[in-house]
Amino acid sequence: MTALRGKTLLASGFHMPERRIVDELADALITIGEDGEILSIRRPGEPTYEAEKRAASAKGNLVTLPAGAYILPGFVDLHVHAPQYPQLGQALDVPLEVWLHQYTFPLEARYADIAFARRSYGLLVDDLLASGTTTALYFATIHQDATRLLADICLERGQRALIGKVTMDNQDQCPQSYRDASPDAAIGGTLALIEYINSHPDNREGRILPVITPRFIPSCTDATLEGLGDLAKSCGCHVQTHCSESDWEHGYVLSRHGMTDTESLDRFGLVGRRSVLAHANFLTPLDMETIRMRQAAVAHCPVSNAYFANAVFPLKATLEKGLHVGLGTDISGGPIGSMFDAMRGAIMVSRILESGTDPDLPPEARSRRADTRIDFRDAFYLATTGGGVALDLPIGRFEPGCQFDALVIDTTAERGTIRLWGDLDHGEAILQKIVYTASKPNITTVWVGGRPIA
Ligand code: GUN
Ligand code: FE
């Protein structure tokens, strides 16, 4: 597909600048600047529409999408463990704390081997881009070289990425073969990655950003959490961690710090406008208020939560309270790397939370939560605009000033899984079908900042 920098795209599609409101673009003219930013969007009927279309066409700058193709904003995956890609679809038969020690830490330790890292990270980034994930918030490993390589690969393949060197130095919770040697090593390694990414000669546009990444409270010493909180304050970088994910994890922090994950992370200065807390399944009302006040975000990971969380995240309540929320696949706690599955998972678990689960109970006793359901609009909002807002980046929607990160859904792709019926499917009903039934063969083009992904 064509590069769109300095061009005008004539296309139909959907985006949701605001929650609950689908904005359908029908034969819209989207003009993209030389830096990948959307300059203007014109719709048929607007005064300058015809003239701008003719002018772009005369200059050979008009790119027209075929009928049956729809553009969507590129997906923002708010929670990915890049090194866990080799175990995607494996090892989900044990609780979180066993999974980490039995499978995950040994796998992540292998990224000391740069050849292993190169193969795994290359496949992952290509796979996610082909799945429409134009921005990913990545946990890497504790290793400096492999984490730098992940940044290099994202720069080379064209993905927008936020990348953290994982910090984990608590001897009680991390194996000797896979942990930072000391708080100094954990904090110094984080600083070194920040400097590497910020001064990378191929990163002048800032498409790759460094992230302060305490794995979660159990794996970190207080000295490291404190040092990372100070660093967050001084550098203004993004922060990511896991928060109140499972009964075990939530209970561990309650007993070690005498407070919830959110309260503790907040005391260390790790809950701010650019913080993303993964899972956050067991938030108290006070935790929710803290996250809202700090304008931090939650990465809701519905698929992974089915295996590890021991509960369903009350998504609707957090949205109604005004928290920033996006979606994460949580590769490989979630065994699927596609944001379509994250959207479908979010809808499904929201319905199950409302209906209840135990068929032996009478209907009125089966669920203790009313009004938890979300629909395809909420799910699509979370995967696009919600992710952009969570990261405080101009992505996830088609508006002047935003980067043109987008994918094309070809609803006519024969090997795809979308079947539109001309007289039945119109307007946002088409988006609904895309959200529920699209698969990889329907994704025919992906752009990041107006650049086509090979
Ligand atoms: N908590 C700490 N590390 C991890 C991880 O790798 N995956 C998940 N899902 N939770 C974690
Ligand atoms: Fe995770």
Image (cartoon, helix red, strand yellow):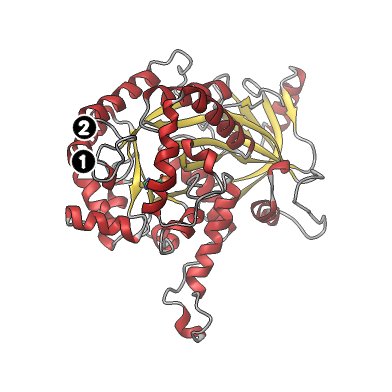
Q: Which mark is residue 221?
A: 1
In the rendered view, does 325 fall on the left or right side of 329?
left
In the rendered view, does 158 fall on the left or right side of 150?
right
Position of residue 363 measured from the top left corner of the image (x, y, whole percent): 51, 84
The residue shown at (44%, 35%) is: 393
For residue 148, what is the image quadrant? top left
The residue shown at (58%, 37%) is: 128
Residue behind mark 2: 183
Disc 2 to disc 1, C-alpha distance: 7 Å
| Closer to us: 165 or 399 | 165
In the rendered view, does 307 fall on the left or right side of 431?
left
Image quadrant holding the C terminus, namely top right
Position of residue 406 measured from the top left corner of the image (x, y, whole percent): 61, 35
Amino acid carrying label 1: it is: Thr
Any part of residue 323 in sight: no
Residue found farthest to the bottom: 362
- Badge 1 local density, few (<14 within 10 Å), some, or many (20+)? some
> Is label 2 in a helix, a strand or a loop?
helix
For residue 32, what is the image quadrant? top right
